[in-house]
Amino acid sequence: MCNSVFSYVIRKPLQGLRNLVSKRAFEEENVQGKIAIVTGANKGIGKEVTYELANRGVTVIMACRNLEAVKESIVEIRNKTFLGTLIPMQLDLASLESVHNFVTAFKARFNHVDILINNAGVMIPDKQTIKTREGFEINVGTNFLGHFLLTNLLMELLRKSDFARVVHVSSLSMKYANLNYEKPLEINIKRKSIYPLGYCNSKFALALFNLELAKRTSNLNVRTYCLCPGCVYTDISDFITADWIGVLQRIKFLQKYLLLSPSQASQSIIYCATAKECARQSGELYRRCKLWGDSVYPDDLFVPGDLPDLNDEDAKKLWKASEKLTKIDTDSLYL
Ligand SMILES: NC(=O)c1ccc[n+]([C@@H]2O[C@H](COP(=O)([O-])OP(=O)(O)OC[C@H]3O[C@@H](n4cnc5c(N)ncnc54)[C@H](OP(=O)(O)O)[C@@H]3O)[C@@H](O)[C@H]2O)c1
């Protein structure tokens, strides 16, 4: 009784309100039969994106580090739709070797890729000393450098598509970044931020990557998009125990009612991957299925939502530094 009163008086109106701000009707390209890669497809927002794409008839490669966890996700998705094809493949973005192995395995099975969703991410506190396999700071190494290498190694196959779209899942938290463009792994921990600085830097780096990638692909049939999915109820902040995110952790049951659901958050990614109205755009930032600057959102209560300052020179410097760190020469990929 108490539960259903709570549901009708609080949960349903809140859900309705969240739907209002997260959903927006848009006309879509027909993506049936397209081939997509979704990193971090086994849970959270990535799992919902995988479901949405499969439900549109897409073959989705679920690029995940834990293939056991993917099995459960496939069962869940298959309980909702029998459309599309789901193919789990091993990818650990915290290991450059694993990224190379993934691309080699992918190329052995497919001759092109239409949609690449760079979604996987970690949010690890700055004070923790966890590193990637190559000894990189864990947030920047996984969220940015792993995807930088993945996208470049897949460029040849993206160029073979007549539809190629690359979608980077960034975050509003990039506003707190303090990125050294020539040394992206450095963290100035004296700077105050409500999110771990390594995380903010990784998300800012993705936005700069998006900018430079758009320049390099401007004469090619490849479009690139970067977005913030909103504040979403997932496991991403489970490592954080201090500050306001730590407080949110302790009242996790309330997050369900206050934050967006992964399904609602997936809409911005589906927008960038399929919408007709952004088909000619490339290198832009998005929120809630719109260009970032086009509206004001409730998340702005947490972090000021004005556009972050992105510039071409910084993006170029970061690209060069990232090439060195990931040991890849990209110039020939964009000729
Ligand atoms: N939730 C939010 O409020 C929010 C806001 C802004 C942006 N985002 C972004 O949205 C994206 C999805 O996050 P989420 O909220 O859905 O979090 P989540 O539920 O924790 O999902 C993160 C996904 O990334 C995967 N992943 C982590 N490290 C990986 C690695 N080394 N190699 C391959 N995959 C790895 C995880 O795999 P495992 O299951 O193996 O850990 C999981 O599938 C992230 O990029 C995040 O930064 C989220």
Image (cartoon, rainbow, N blue to C red):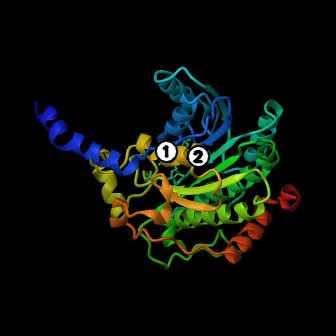
Q: Quadrant of the N terminus?
A: top left
> Which residue bears the numbered disc 1?
26
On screen, residue 67 versus residue 21, left or right, reads right
Q: Amino acid at mark 2?
A: Lys
Q: Amino acid at mark 1?
A: Phe
Q: CA distance from mark 1 to mark 2?
A: 8 Å
Q: Secondary structure at mark 2?
A: loop
Residue at image point 63% right, 72% down: 186
Who is closer to the viewer here, 215 or 103? Answer: 215
Q: Secondary structure at mark 1?
A: loop
217 up-or-down from 15: above or below: below
Q: Quadrant of the C terminus?
A: bottom right
- Can residue 131 be seen in the rendering of this structure? no
Residue at image point 57% right, 23% down: 83
On screen, residue 117 versus residue 159, left or right, reads left
Crowd class of label 1 (few under 14; some 14 to 19; many from 20; radius 10 Å): few
Who is closer to the viewer here, 237 or 282? Answer: 282
10 up-or-down from 331: above or below: above
Pick whichever of labels 1 and 2 is earlier in the sequence.
1
- Can residue 254 be seen in the rendering of this structure? yes
Q: Position of residue 21 (x, y in %)?
A: 36, 51
> How many marks can you see?
2
On screen, residue 246 versus residue 222, left or right, reads left
> Which residue bears the numbered disc 2?
276
Residue at image point 33% right, 60% down: 298
Q: Position of residue 306 (x, y in %)?
A: 45, 71
Q: Looking at the image, do the residues carrying marks 1 and 2 touch, with CB atoms under 8 Å apart?
A: yes
Who is closer to the viewer here, 104 or 98? Answer: 104
Crowd class of label 2 (few under 14; some 14 to 19; many from 20; radius 10 Å): some
State the residue lying farthest toward the left.
1
